[in-house]
Amino acid sequence: MNVLLIGSGGREDAVARKIVEKDNLYSVITNENPSIIDLSQEYIKYNENNFNEIIKFSNENKIDIAFVSPDEILNTDLVNILRENHIPVASPSKKAAMIETSKEYMRYIMDKYKIKGNIENKIINNYDSLNKFFNGNDGEYAIKPIGLTGGKGVKVMGLQLKNREEAIDYAKTIINKDGKVLIEKRETGEEFSIQAFSDGKNIVYMPVAQDYKRLYEGDNGPNTGGMGSITDKNLSLPFLSDKTVEDAKKILNDIITSMRKEDNEFKGVIYGQFMATENGVKVIEINSRLADPEGINVLTLLKSNIVDIFLDIYSGTLKNNIKFENKSTVLKYIVPPGYGMEPVETELRIKDNIENNNFKLYYASVSGELTKIKTTKSRSLALIGIADSIYEASDIVESNLKNITGNYYIRHDIGTRNMIENKIKL
């Protein structure tokens, strides 16, 4: 099969490697990712102002199925245009991707169909209503832009926002920029992610994962796109109950069913960011694509042919026979100095042939060669350890850092025994 992949971050490098296990990869890249370029039969640069070039490239290379990966591209008309030109796509339309690109739409779906896990929320579009809301309500709230923020736009009272005045000021900046802001009641608990393949009717779940967004060790500092993530060998997590996981899966299934009732069928990868609270599972957000970094963990474990999955998504024949390896994984992202605040582009060198059955390295927002890369201001390399326990997988990542030289930052605490045992005690 000839498969078109659109996107070129760490998540897309993981998709690319699954594709080339049995099929031919053709790529549309946003940055000159050396791994994806090396794996591709042919590639072109992404041009948001010329989708006809992508159609031409697809036709010339007789593409059998396409997968559009990044959220910002799913928020364009590209998937619709590919479909209109009779190119099969295993990704959601722009309308279906609204489950991620519009938090207002997501909350509307959950409210209309009475899906469990919704959070008390309010959309506010002017200063007067904003001031009245805070004057009339006690407690702490999360302040969220309606649209995409790359994991960095949400600020929470008691965390990134010290008091009500800071919350009001931040909400005003969002209103000034977007015309409205989403205010949600702050929930506390353990966050986790569940990703799933969907053909619009059927849904097949991937291993449960946990993402670490905070920049510094101990889950301190500003939010980022994600500094790392973990999965466990039983495909759940040791600090989550079976009921918590099943409740979250049902929420995802109910969202897929509700979107079909809305004549907005979702075909592709959907994932929920959930929180296990004292009052049950709550939905933090729903996304319309593979997670980054959690998607890299689960793709590393995927045993089934990903192109067959893409074809089943497109044709509406998804089957519950997708297999994952029963291993634990820990991913830690190498990022440029100053990432999350004032990042500085730099160069890194990587020793050749360092991958094996227990260690994988994926290239993200970088360019250059496989052994010598130039970073951007975003995440650079995703390092994954694979083992029988989370702690061992973390140690595998640490033991391979000697093979990467240059000036970079990484969170060492992700997946350590101390971190996991502290979560289990809570």
Image (cartoon, rainbow, N blue to C red):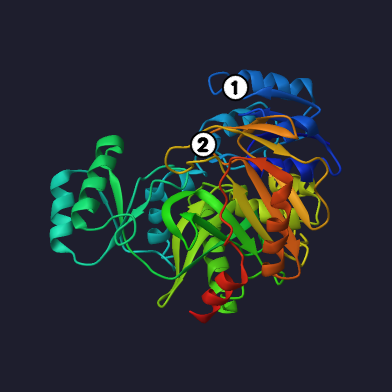
Cα–Cα span, label 2 and label 1: 15 Å
Total residue callouts = 2
Given the image, on which type of amino acid does mark 2 rest?
A: Glu
Quadrant showing the N terminus: top right
Read off the residue under disc 2. 72
SS class of the residue under badge 2?
helix
Q: Looking at the image, is 62 positioned above or below residue 355?
A: above
Residue 91 visible (yes or no): yes
SS class of the residue under badge 1?
helix
Q: Looking at the image, is 379 positioned above or below residue 276?
A: above
Q: Quadrant of residue 197?
A: bottom right
Residue at 57% across / 18% down in the picture?
A: 50
x then y, percent, for residue 173: 26, 40
Residue at 72% across / 69% down in the picture?
A: 233
Q: Quadrant of residue 405?
A: top right
Read off the residue under disc 1. 51
Nearest the camera: 409 or 178?
409
